[in-house]
């Protein structure tokens, strides 16, 4: 069904003047990039170099590439934020119709190109779902009737009509992402750019967002540009795949032709040195128990977040924790680390009961990597950052310096020792986080979504480090939405559902149980 | 105890937020300028009556909270001890001297503490019965520039996000061996240093994303914007607005024209 979401053929764009409307004729291409080069201030290497690309109306283009290859910069340039909002040196240009984005005000571009960014939390600016979707049309001072129509149509387009009346802070990750897309659609753009729309989402929510994208493509014939690392669900629906590498277009063509070449490119840079990673350690039932959870209940703001969880974790286990957004995975790890005190039941870490022990004492045994790399960077140089915990624990400075050097070398961060941590790329920051929790020699490593926003190369580097730590006889607990990675490397799988531990078994048994429960979105794709 | 908006459908909830705000302002003005203890007590009684109408129990719990009891008691005691004028009604031995308690001290203490209490609890009732977003949208609809209005909306939106981020930061510090649970100036300084920088980094990255999100939806491209959310002015709203404004005006005029009327109504002891 086509539900009249966008302007009728001759309908006047409410923001553009008559002359500028004529500048955006519905002719090929929808978007044209001509010899675009862009450098961020203070960077030696351009983020984008001599990019030339023509995107036809109604085309679904998938843009991918390693972290730092310039994908997000390209999105900002296509939507006009470069040069209007983002500072830097730019040459060449982006044309929409026959008008250059640099000569057109951003408010006029807003009704032609919309960009939906990676983190929906950061782009929702009002307090209710309706206000969020109406925000753009209200800014355009459209008639109330038209705004209400767009609100209904856009929410319907992303299957979110049922969310009307809900407060935005109370939505789940997947719901927020779809509301963010609906709010961009309400601007009635001709080109919609989605920058990693599923990176923060669990497999089920990601599937819902991808279904919404597919629906838009079929119903609205919208020109879609999706930037993604998770390629497999999009390969069959995209018309074209563009691979960026170091700011340049490396590959461009039909996904079936480009994808194998891209895989080969990634494999050539694989963190495991072109070989298969060594498997995780095989533990025995005689290995000592390092974590013991007995009948754990935890409530937050009158809501039961965890209920009746019991589990023993033995030294050397590599546990993958999976489940939907909001199912209690992070809260569970926080309880294990003593950051949340149980409302009922007990948690024991290396013989220390979390009820009676200070977090900073428990922390001596645990290395905890949180979701956002910026939340755990406290020092002014990479070297100091790695030594931060050891200094707080009062460890020998000489030993600390030696260990810091070793872990930095293992993660390929040695050249940046004197750099400010915030100057590192997202992937490098993530590896730095890992270095900084390993330097004090913990027995247990806890990773909360370590692969978010990471390309295959960085993900493999992180996984290799976790496996190395595990093979030294240590325990790893890892929360991840990357189901393939979890099933490939973990020796035990825990599936959380609405605060309960639904499955806790080895991968083979877990696979069967998950299948039986009908939660197939938490199963890896068949290779 | 934090007073929060409760979503129900009472008479007070249904009133236009601007009309309620006008009553709050007028009430504050009257309470401050009247200088009468019976009037203050009557106002406090009115607020409790309104609390019942709103079907809330937050105000009673707020008044009985340790913070409020302590604050009101401190104001009362400080006024009693610091006011020297008036008839001495008693004295307290204090080291080598005595602190006199005067009738004026008691009068002032009671008046000021009740004045504080009555203004604070009506403010609390306003918060309990007014959706903050509705209030800001109503202000924008009556002419407050929408750029300012959205500053408040954004602040409300981001407050919860930053609270969550601060919690994560603190957790990350604890997990890296920072003894946040220990006291001491050094620990406090270290914690502050380790909190401020990452929080600023996170805030700035959020600002970047918000700019993209808002500019990308034509925010600020026009002088005016449409507001879809219906917030009508009923007869009751209009009457409240006019009556409260008239009352406030009367009190102000009275203050300018007859500064000594009404006389101090507090009965002398």
Image (cartoon, coloured by chain):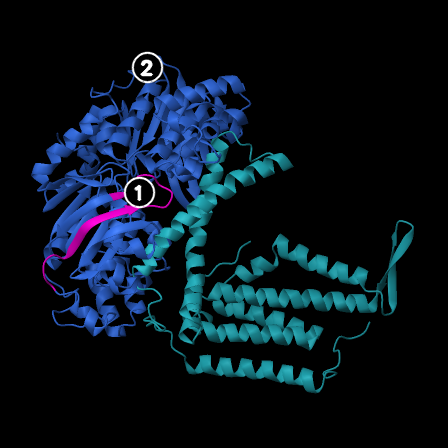
Chain colours: A blue, B cyan
Part of the protein shown in magenta: A26-48
Residue A422 in the image, given as x and y percentages of width and height: 41, 38
Give left or right: position of B90 versus B266: right
| Residue ID at (45%, 64%) | B132
Looking at the image, residue A107 lies above or below residue A487:
below
For label 2, the crowd category at 10 Å Cα-Cα, with few meaning under 14, some 14 to 19 and many 20 or more, is few
Give left or right: position of B140 versus A59: right
Residue A193 in the image, given as x and y percentages of width and height: 22, 52
* Residue A36 inside the magenta-drawn segment: yes
Q: Nearer the viewer, residue B121 or A218?
A: A218
* Residue A256 inside the magenta-drawn segment: no
Q: Chain of mark 2?
A: A
Q: Chain of mark 1?
A: A
Residue designated by label 1 = A325
Looking at the image, residue A376 lies above or below residue B256:
above
Residue B150 in the image, given as x and y percentages of width and height: 41, 64
Residue designated by label 2 = A285
Looking at the image, residue A99 lies above or below residue A195:
below
């Amino acid at each position: 069904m086509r539900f009249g979401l966008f302007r009728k053929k001759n309908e006047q764009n409410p923001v553009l003047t008559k002359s500028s409307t004529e500048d955006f004729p519905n002719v090929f291409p929808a978007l044209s990039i001509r010899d675009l080069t862009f450098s961020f201030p203070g960077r030696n290497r351009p983020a984008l170099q001599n990019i030339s690309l023509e995107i036809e109306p109604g085309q679904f283009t998938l843009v991918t590439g390693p972290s730092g290859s310039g994908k997000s910069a390209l999105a900002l340039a296509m939507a006009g934020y470069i040069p209007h909002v983002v500072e830097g040196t730019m040459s060449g240009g982006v044309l929409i119709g026959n008008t250059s984005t640099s000569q057109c005000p951003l408010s006029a571009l807003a009704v032609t190109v919309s960009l939906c960014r990676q983190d929906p939390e950061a782009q929702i600016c009002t307090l209710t779902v309706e206000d969020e979707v109406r925000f753009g049309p209200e800014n355009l001072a459209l008639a109330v009737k038209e705004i209400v129509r767009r609100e209904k149509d856009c929410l319907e387009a992303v299957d979110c009509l049922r969310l009307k009346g809900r407060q935005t802070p109370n939505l789940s990750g997947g719901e927020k992402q779809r509301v963010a897309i609906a709010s961009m659609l309400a601007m009635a753009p001709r080109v919609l750019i989605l920058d990693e729309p599923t990176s923060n989402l669990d497999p089920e929510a990601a599937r819902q967002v991808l279904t919404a994208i597919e629906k838009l493509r079929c119903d609205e014939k919208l020109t879609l540009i999706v930037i993604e690392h998770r390629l497999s669900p999009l390969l069959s629906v995209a018309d074209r795949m563009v691979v960026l590498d170091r700011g340049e277009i490396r590959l461009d063509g039909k996904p079936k032709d480009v994808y194998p070449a891209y895989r080969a490119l990634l494999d050539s840079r694989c963190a495991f040195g072109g070989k298969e990673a060594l498997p995780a350690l095989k533990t025995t039932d005689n290995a000592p128990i390092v974590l013991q959870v007995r009948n754990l209940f935890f409530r937050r703001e009158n809501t039961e977040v965890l209920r009746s969880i019991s589990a023993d974790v033995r030294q050397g286990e590599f546990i993958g924790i999976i489940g939907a957004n909001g199912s209690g995975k992070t809260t569970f790890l926080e309880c294990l680390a003593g950051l949340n005190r149980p409302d009922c039941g007990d948690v024991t870490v290396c013989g220390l009961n979390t009820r009676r022990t200070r977090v900073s004492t428990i922390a001596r045994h645990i290395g905890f990597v949180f979701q956002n790399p910026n939340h755990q960077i406290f020092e002014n140089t990479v070297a100091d950052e790695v030594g931060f915990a050891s200094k707080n624990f009062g460890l020998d400075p000489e030993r600390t310096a030696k260990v810091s050097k070793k872990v930095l070398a293992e993660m390929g961060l040695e050249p940046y020792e004197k750099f400010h941590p915030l100057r590192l790329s997202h992937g490098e920051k993530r590896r730095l986080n890992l270095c900084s929790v390993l330097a004090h020699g913990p027995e247990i490593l806890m990773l909360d979504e370590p692969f978010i926003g990471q390309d295959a190369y960085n993900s493999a580097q992180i996984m290799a480090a976790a496996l190395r730590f595990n093979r030294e006889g240590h325990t790893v607990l890892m929360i991840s939405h990357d189901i393939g990675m979890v099933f490939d490397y973990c020796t035990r799988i825990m599936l959380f559902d609405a605060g309960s531990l639904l499955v806790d078994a080895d991968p083979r048994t877990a696979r069967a149980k998950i299948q039986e429960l009908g939660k197939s979105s938490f199963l890896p794709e068949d290779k | 105890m934090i007073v929060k908006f409760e979503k129900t459908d009472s008479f007070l909830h249904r009133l236009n937020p601007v009309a309620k705000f006008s009553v709050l302002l007028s009430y504050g003005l009257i309470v401050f300028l009247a200088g009468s203890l019976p009037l203050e007590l009557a106002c406090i009684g009115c607020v409790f009556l309104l609390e019942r109408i709103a079907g809330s129990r937050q105000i009673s719990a707020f008044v009985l909270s340790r913070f409020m009891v302590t604050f009101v008691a401190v104001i009362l005691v400080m006024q009693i001890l610091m006011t020297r004028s008036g008839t001495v009604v008693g004295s307290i031995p204090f080291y080598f001297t005595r602190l006199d308690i005067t009738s004026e001290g008691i009068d002032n203490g009671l008046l000021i503490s009740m004045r504080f209490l009555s203004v604070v609890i009506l403010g609390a009732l306003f918060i309990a019965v007014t959706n903050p977003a509705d209030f800001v949208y109503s202000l924008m609809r009556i002419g407050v520039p929408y750029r300012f209005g959205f500053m408040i909306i954004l602040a409300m939106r981001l407050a919860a996000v930053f609270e969550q981020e601060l919690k994560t930061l603190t957790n990350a510090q604890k997990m890296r061996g920072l003894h946040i649970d220990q006291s001491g100036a050094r620990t406090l300084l270290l914690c502050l240093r380790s909190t401020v920088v990452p929080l600023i980094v996170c805030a700035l990255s959020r600002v970047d994303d918000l700019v993209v999100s808002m500019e990308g939806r034509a925010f600020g491209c026009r002088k005016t914007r449409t507001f879809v959310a219906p917030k009508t002015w009923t007869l009751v709203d209009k009457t409240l607005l006019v009556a409260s404004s008239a009352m406030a005006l009367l009190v102000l005029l009275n203050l300018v024209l007859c500064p000594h009327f009404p006389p101090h109504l507090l009965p002398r002891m």
